[in-house]
Image (cartoon, rainbow, N blue to C red):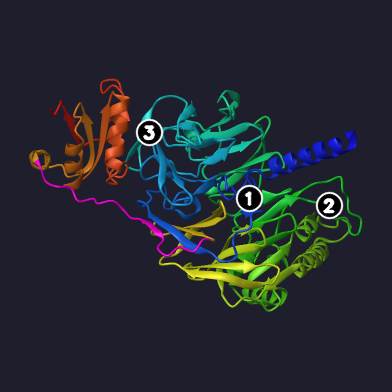
Amino acid sequence: MIRSRLIVCTLALITLALALSTAGAEDWPMYRYDVGRTAATPMELPAELHLQWTRQLPEPQPAWTAERKRFDTCYQPIVAGKLMLIGSNSNDSVTAYDTKSGIEKWRFFCDGPVRLAPVVADGKVYFGSDDGYLYCLDLQTGREIWKSQGALRDRNVLGNKRIISSWPVRCAPIVADGKVFFTAGIFPSMGVSRYQLDATTGKVIWQSDETLTTSHQGYPALIDGQLVVPGGRARPIFYDWQTGQYTREISTLFGTPFVSGIEGLFIQNHWITGKAMGKYEYGKPNLDHEFPVESPGFMEDAVLTAKTFYTVLDPDRTLNRRIYFYASTIKEKKQYYSKIMKGSAPGDLIKIDTEAVRRSWVKVPLDEDLERTEALKKRRAILKEIEDKFYSSIVPVKLPVKLKKIWLKAGSRLYASDVNQTQVVAIDLAKGSVSWQEKLPAPIVAMIAGDDKLFIITDKSQIFCFGGEKKEIPAEHASPDQIIAEDKWTKCAADILSATAQVSGNALVLGVQNVRLWEALASQSELHITAIVPDAEKVAEYRKALDDRWLYGRRVEVHVGDPLAFHIPPYVHSLILVSDSQ
């Protein structure tokens, strides 16, 4: 009897352990799934997917136009439980939608654009804003739990037509081990601060305000205890997760909006980088040395797993630096590329053995016993041998559809888009074949998997949710009616604009608490309107009313504060309205 009870208890403990270990397995809690930005989840999606619902969102308002700094040009959703969350640089909010129906569950407004995807951990939502704060909300209700100011002090500037902090948060938070990391500031000359906080209380664990030569913008990664933080156009910087201390930089050609990695591998700007297995000593490897060196490319958009990397063959990205050592002309480079890629063509899926990448990490110094010309020749031959071994590990997969990008791995399938980015393609890895595909009305710009569903964002800011249930009529959440009926405030706005001859630029409203007047001014001009209101409850009411017409953030913004004490940037408003319209 005792033995049977022990068996029952043991089984119960095992069951509990399994439940805990798989908790959240159907979530997609942050950008590219995890802190390594691997874009690979163990969750299996249904083999056949059907459209469940669609939703139209406002057009994003990105911070930058340069390609290497375009980290917020589209919506990047995440999924936690039965909620899909989206941060918005258009209306300064984070919104939670029901994954099954697409119905809005809650919306939280802050005082500046939210440019990067939020992160969910332990029932809490973390995100940063251009207002200089990191926020922590309750996942189920959207209620604010705490917020932490990353900005060095309260000082506002005009940024992207908006009133924002001089030290905006434009680097996505990283949450791990009960701690959250974030940065504030984008101009090194003004100061860039790094913080690690207790994820539960928001208490500062460490802070660094050291002078940096680069800003922190985009999506960082946590790889082997090292924070790898992108710098927009500049190279990424490595910091120690426990202390925040600077550890190193790696020279790369360009910066990128995000970095990724797994088990010592770091991928950025098409390059694989890692610690060297050892220094090549002509048949006698010295394992006491470690060198960060660069290996073959085409990996920026790769999906990463412990055994295999998955990416799409792109010839413009595969001519890596090492080939330049032993292929002296572009023609030779292309011939060499064609040979090593085993007859595969652009748009083919390729699989790369992770261990083979590690084996290619070898620093090859010059043989000091040889004359320099001979030493260089010998080194080129060794590099070519290393490169050949690496390329021999690449397995091309021929499919009937040419691909542009692999977005994610969910269970035993990859999910990709075709060369036109208008068709989603599911690839069965066991069979090496297309198992499902669906045409979309616009190019795909983001894709995630969560709660047994596939969520896709197009460049028209539409969300498409696909699931296993077949729907006769998928739910459609269209854009709101933006037609405003004329009333006395329409004429009042027309009179103001006529009398001041100000129809573009920035307008400041102090003491005029009338949403209809703001709407009328916005509809009859190109002005961006900023209102300062002391009552927080009124501000929440005004924000919701304006957002219901897609005006909030894009044309009108409302801040809580004393109009006489609020820090307003000087010389930026061409029209100022003062008084009470009542």
Q: For marks 2 and 3, give the CA distance.
A: 52 Å
**Image position of 379 with respect to 338: above or below:** above
First to last magenta residue range: 469-487
Marks 3 and 1: CB-CB under 8 Å? no
Q: Which mark is residue 260?
A: 1
Name the kind of residue labelled 1 in the image.
Answer: Ser
Camera sees residue 214: no
Going from N to C along the chain, the mark reached first, 2 or 1, is 1
Q: Amino acid at mark 3?
A: Asp
Res. 476 mark: none
Residue to which mark 3 is pinned: 111
- Secondary structure category for the residue under label 3: loop
Residue 420 shown in magenta:
no
Q: Is the Cβ of the residue at disc 2 closer than 8 Å to that at disc 1?
A: no
Whole-percent x, y for residue 396 in the image: 69, 72
Residue farthest right in this picture: 284
How far is mark 2 from mark 1, CA to CA? Answer: 25 Å
Neighbourhood count class around disc 2 (C-alpha, 10 Å): few under 14, some 14–19, many 20 upward: some
Type of residue at label 2?
A: Lys
Label 3 Cα crowd, 10 Å radius (few <14 / some 14-19 / many 20+): many
Quarter of the N terminus within the rendering: top right
> Mark 2 — residue?
279
